Image: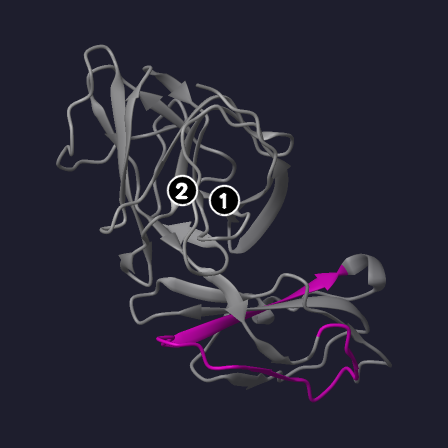
Amino acid sequence: MSTKTKEAVVVLVLLGSVLLGCNFSKRTNSNSSGNANSTTANTNTSVKPNADGTVPSGTGVEKEKPESGKANVQGKVFYNQQPATAVDVKLCEKFNQYFGGCQGETFATKTDAQGEYLIKNVPPRVYEGLIVKVFDTPFYVFATSGIVSTAKYKIDADQTFFAPDTNLFKNNLKLLNPKAGAKIGPADIELKWDAYPDAAYYKFSIYADSTSGAKTEYDYINKRVDGVSYALDKPLAPGAYRCKIEAFNGNDIKLAQSSDDINFTVTGVAPK
């Protein structure tokens, strides 16, 4: 049975050290939708693609054998290394990262109490999308990382495809200073944020809008901080900037990030 729905979808992919978000509206042709208990975003274990660009299957224990001539897709979803339950997962025949999102024949399921999912008895073919919903938000994430763009999955008949683990993260880390929309001087800038539960350390990035005259300081991209504040040791050039803070646990798993819309402006003239 197929249904047509439209939802706002954001799929996040790891591009070098920068996380990019893309908005989608999407058509589904499947059998489930989901809901759970938290807030925003994703990352997971790095996967090296095959020579043809498809994601290789991992290994594991089959929950069920597929029907003859069909295939199963099996995987796990975590948050803070704990199972993420009742989360939607979709396998998409076609996927357009920029227009339409999940398209064509789509198969959907939810994770169980162990954070595991099983998409059963799908036609063998190359699929262009495997996406995981971020709890009860309208956001989805790719079930792979280390691959710039959507990934393709070659699903073979009479076999179970073991997808890479997906580690969700939230979008609710609170940046205290600078505040969104703030106008500040170029020197003596101190970043401050709320401590995040189970965080062992943080990383911050300050992205410059070069069209405004702002200049990127590469020392302030993915800068690790063990506390909840950091005083910049060099001034910023006047212009517009965006700040992001990320929290990680002791095993380097991302737990949360600040909102994407924390923009501030540096005014005046930077000291030489």
Horizontally, residue 32 falls left or right of residue 237, namely left
Task: Report the quarter where the N terminus lies.
Answer: top left
Horizontally, residue 230 falls left or right of residue 159, namely right
Residues at circles 1 and 2 in contact by the CB criterion of under 8 Å: yes
Q: Residue at horizontal 47%, vertical 45%? A: 141
Instruction: Work out which residue is located at the far bottom of the displayed protein and give it.
Output: 188
Magenta stretch: residue 182 in it? Answer: yes
Asked if 12 appears above or below 224 in the picture, the reply is above
Q: Residue at horizontal 39%, vertical 19%? A: 126
Which element type, helix, strand or loop, lies under badge 1? strand
Task: Report the quarter where the C terminus lies.
Answer: bottom right
What is the number of the mark on residue 140? 1
Of circles 1 and 2, the one toward us is: 2
How many angstroms separate mark 1 from mark 2 (CA)? Answer: 9 Å
Give the crowd class for mark 2: few <14, some 14-19, many >=20 residues within 10 Å.
Answer: many
Residue at the spot of label 2: 88
